Image: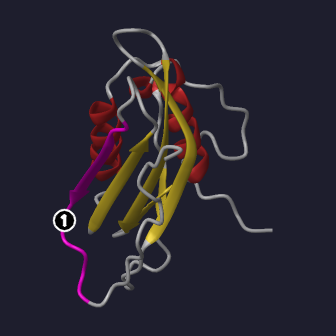
Amino acid sequence: MAKKPTGLTQLGNSAPLPASPDKAVLERVANPHADTDYVARFTVPEFTSICPVTGQPDFAHLVIDYVPGKWLVESKSLKLYMQAFRNHGAFHEDCTVGIGKRLVETLKPKWLRIGGYWYPRGGIPIDVFWQKGKLPAGVWAPDQGVAPYRGRG
């Protein structure tokens, strides 16, 4: 069995759902291939938050791609961070860009992009895209694979 990295507080332990995204702890682990550029992808197909005006739920499919430097995001802490948005009131743009910025602050990746593919609110789907840095030469970053919203037409 692999040894648990030191300093992690959530992985392998009972961890309550954070009260808000600001209170969530994003943890990181050392990148065992820091000398190699590659893309890591996290997909959150059932992301939810709350409309700050109406209090109604908003739903999105998030795709996060990054080229790690020294650090990788620890996936359990990322899951808890994402779940903390379920009762958080924020517009689509704020959620998407805020998640990207928080990951950049925590991980200091060589490159990161996030695509927020939001389901319609008021009859209008809103997709939000944010990127930090430039994709290193020679690194393959596949299309995020999420089709644009299409109604029944």
- Farthest left residue? 133
**Is 147 on the left or on the right of 35, as rendered?**
right
Q: Residues within 10 Å of mark 1 (few under 14, many from 20)?
A: few
* Vertical position of residue 68 compared to residue 121: above or below: below
Picture residue at 27% right of the left edge, 41% below the top: 97
Quarter the N terminus occupies? bottom right
Picture residue at 66% right of the left edge, 31% below the top: 15
Identity of the amino acid at label 1? Gly
* Dot 1: element: loop
**Is 19 on the left or on the right of 100, as rendered?**
right
* Vertical position of residue 14 compared to residue 27: above or below: above
Q: Which residue is mark 1?
A: 133
Q: How far across and down, in percent of the image, does residue 137 sit? A: 23, 87
Q: How far across and down, in percent of the image, does residue 102 sit? A: 32, 42
Picture residue at 38% right of the left edge, 23% below the top: 122
Picture residue at 57% right of the left edge, 47% below the top: 45
On the question of residue 109 being in view, the answer is no
On the question of residue 10 being in view, the answer is yes
Give the quadrant of residue 91.
top left
Give the quadrant of residue 39.
bottom left
Q: How far across and down, in percent of the image, does residue 53 sit? A: 34, 9
* Vertical position of residue 7 compared to residue 110: above or below: above
Q: Nearer the viewer, residue 31 or 48?
A: 48
What residue range appears in magenta?
Answer: 125-137
Q: Nearer the viewer, residue 129 or 42?
A: 129
